[in-house]
Amino acid sequence: MYKGRIARFDEPGKPFQIETVTLPEVGPGEILVRVTRAKICGSDVHAWHGTFATRGLGGQLPTVLGHEMVGAVEALGDGVAADSNGKPLQTGTRVVFPYFYSCHSCRNCLAGRRNGCLKLKMAMLGRADEPPYFVGGYGDYYLLPAGAVVYTVPDSVGDDIAAGANCALSQVMYGFERVDLQLGEHVVVQGAGALGLYAIAVAKARGATNVIAIDGITERLELAAAFGADTVLDLNQVATPRDRAKAVRALTDGHGADVVVEVVGHPSAIEEGLQMLGQFGRYVEIGNINAGQTFAFDPSRFVFGNKTMVGVSLYDPAVLSRALIFLDRHQHELPFDRLAATTYSLDDINDAFAAADGKRDIRASITP
């Protein structure tokens, strides 16, 4: 038996409750992970507020939130001996894993679209009041189901850096792969939170000639430059969408951006971003996850500009392995550590969410 704490989430608007639970056993094919760090992602904050309803994805309450995490193997179920790259696993091996699980047999999985699995399961959707209890990252343990994709973390990559790989970093990497970002292209990143900062870094690594970051918080704009942005546009100084679109045109030789990435999370950013796209531009929509919000736009811009919009939800699980390589190669030249500078104990999770909600921390972390 394995006894540990969880931060039980009963419903939006109520504080987390720390509860001690017991997992009877680790079943065949399962992996029990001792969580060493779990970040507070924007979707966790949305779920906490109730604007991102996990029930809409088949989730139930009470549950355990948290999905952007890293940990060490605590116990291996029968039949598990290696990670998804064939590297041996044993107690204490540090691992990361996609927080969603594909069936590998439905039509989408068989077509290579595992992030669109028709039977998709996910962290934060299980019940916290029945076994296995450890169904989210905000706890001492997290139970990986049989058949889950899992990767060993290189010894050179610390937990503070690795924790962001399985959500924010992998998702923007996958987004750029979806639109086939090319060497020498112009990129605009709307929003310089964690997703935006990763997007800047990945765009530069893929050979973007000019990355323009847009935000209204001075500290984030400073970080955007540190992560490789060639130009930053301050919403407080370039105050209107029209002026910002004109600025992007001027910075791209009058052509507009080849790729625009939206990670603001508000529909109003989309119409503005579409105006920044040049001919044959591709718009990568990641940030808007709250259902029921809309925006108005002129579809003729798409038709006459031969433009494309790509919605990006989750990522192909194999991207996570490449994300670890990216972190290993670039960790000494980019300030990844500043994305997780503030940590809170599990007992202080309510304070951590208050800080994250106030945007005082780009990615606060829980270290059980």
Image (tube, rainbow, N blue to C red):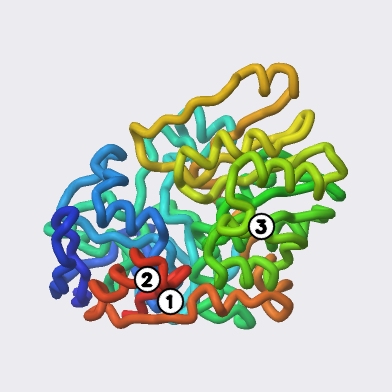
Q: Position of residue 272 (x, y in %)?
A: 59, 38
Any mark on residue 233, and which? Answer: 3
- Between residue 40 and residue 92, name the one nearer to us: 40
Question: Which callout, 3 or 2, points to the residue nearer the camera?
Answer: 3
Q: If the image is split into quadrants, where does the N terminus sit?
A: bottom left
Q: Position of residue 252 (x, y in %)?
A: 82, 46
Circles 1 and 2, Cβ within 8 Å, touching? The answer is yes
Looking at numbered disc 1 in the image, what kind of residue is underneath it? Ala
Looking at numbered disc 3 in the image, what kind of residue is underneath it? Leu
How many numbered circles does the render carry?
3
- Name the element at disc 2: strand
- Between residue 115 and residue 77, name the one nearer to us: 115
Looking at numbered disc 2 in the image, what kind of residue is underneath it? Val
> Residue at the spot x=61%, y=63% of the render?
197
Local packing at callout 1 (Cα closer than 10 Å; few below 14, some 14-19, many 20+) is many
Q: Which residue is mark 2?
A: 33
Task: Report whether residue 298 is seen.
Answer: yes
Q: Which residue is mark 1?
A: 72
Left or right, residue 202 beside residue 172 = right
Label 1 – label 2 distance at C-alpha: 5 Å
Quarter residue 129 falls in? bottom left
Label 1 – label 3 distance at C-alpha: 40 Å
> Residue at the spot x=21%, y=70% of the render?
6
- Name the element at disc 1: strand
Left or right, residue 279 beside residue 193 = right
> Residue at the spot x=64%, y=37% of the render?
283
- Between residue 3 and residue 90, name the one nearer to us: 3
Left or right, residue 304 beside residue 320 = right
Q: Earlier in the sequence, mark 1 or mark 2?
A: 2
Task: Report whether residue 83 is seen.
Answer: no
Q: Position of residue 270 (x, y in %)?
A: 55, 37
